[in-house]
Amino acid sequence: MSLHVSSGKLKGRIIHAPAGIEPTRPTPGVVRAALFSILGPEITLGAFCDLYAGTGSVAIEAISRGAPRATAVESHAKALACLRRTCDELSLDDQLEIVRTDVARFRRAASYHVVFSDPPFAAITEDMLDRCLELCRPGGHAVLQWPSDRPREWPDHIQVRRYGSSQLVMARKV
C-alpha cells in the first residue's frame, strides 16, 4: 500500500505503508489537508513532532510544506520499516528523525513548535492533549486526532473541528 504527499516540495512522492490497515490507520487526506490549512505558515516556524507516526505521512507532509525538521515516533516494526524506506527514497535523513519507542516513554519537554498525535482510537487517554502540550515550546501548537463518536467537553481555549469519524482538537501552549 502507498500514500502520496499532497503538497509542497515533495508533492506526489510516495509514502510507503504496510499492507492492510493494521498496524497503521493513516491520517485521512482530508484531515491532513485541514491540519496544514489551519496551521498555515506556523509549520515553518520550528520542529514538528508526529506521535504514533505509523507511515510518517504527517511528518513527511510537514517537511514538504516547510517544517525545518520533524521527529516521527513509532514502535511498530512493520510501520517503521515502511517509514525508513520512504525516508531513504526521499533523502530525508537530515530532516526526519525516526524514533523507535512507545509514545508513553518519549520525553522531550518544550522541544517542538507543532506536536501532532494520531493514536489508535482505542488507546487514546483523556490526558493525551496535555501530554502533547508538554512537548511543545511556548507559542507552539498541540493537535490531537480524536474520534468523533467519543463525545467530550473541552475548555473554551481548545478548538475542535470535525472531519467525518475524526476531530482535530487543538491547543496553543502559552
Image: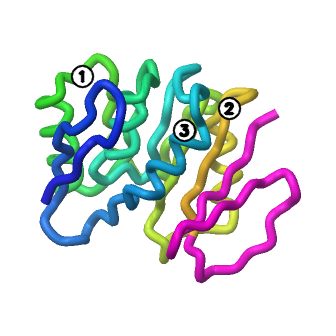
Q: Earlier in the sequence, mark 2 or mark 1?
A: 1
Span shown in magenta: 147-174
In the image, residue 71 sits, relative to residue 17, either above or below, namely above
Amino acid type for the residue under numbered disc 2:
Gly
Element class at badge 3: loop
Q: Which residue is mark 3?
A: 107
Measuring from the top left, give residue 93's x and y in whole percent: 24, 22
Foreground of the two, 6 or 118: 6
In the image, residue 40 sits, relative to residue 142, either above or below, namely above
Find the distance from the CA under tag 3 to the CA under tag 2. 16 Å
In the image, residue 18 sits, relative to residue 121, either above or below, namely above
Q: Which residue is mark 2?
A: 140
Amino acid type for the residue under numbered disc 3:
Arg
Q: Earlier in the sequence, mark 3 or mark 2?
A: 3
Q: Residue at x 65, y 61 (%)?
A: 161
Give the class, few, some or many, for how many residues have Cα within 10 Å of label 1's Cα (few <14, many ≥20). few
Q: Which residue is mark 1?
A: 93
Element class at badge 1: loop
Q: Indicate yes or no whether the magenta region holds residue 171.
A: yes
Q: Earlier in the sequence, mark 3 or mark 1?
A: 1
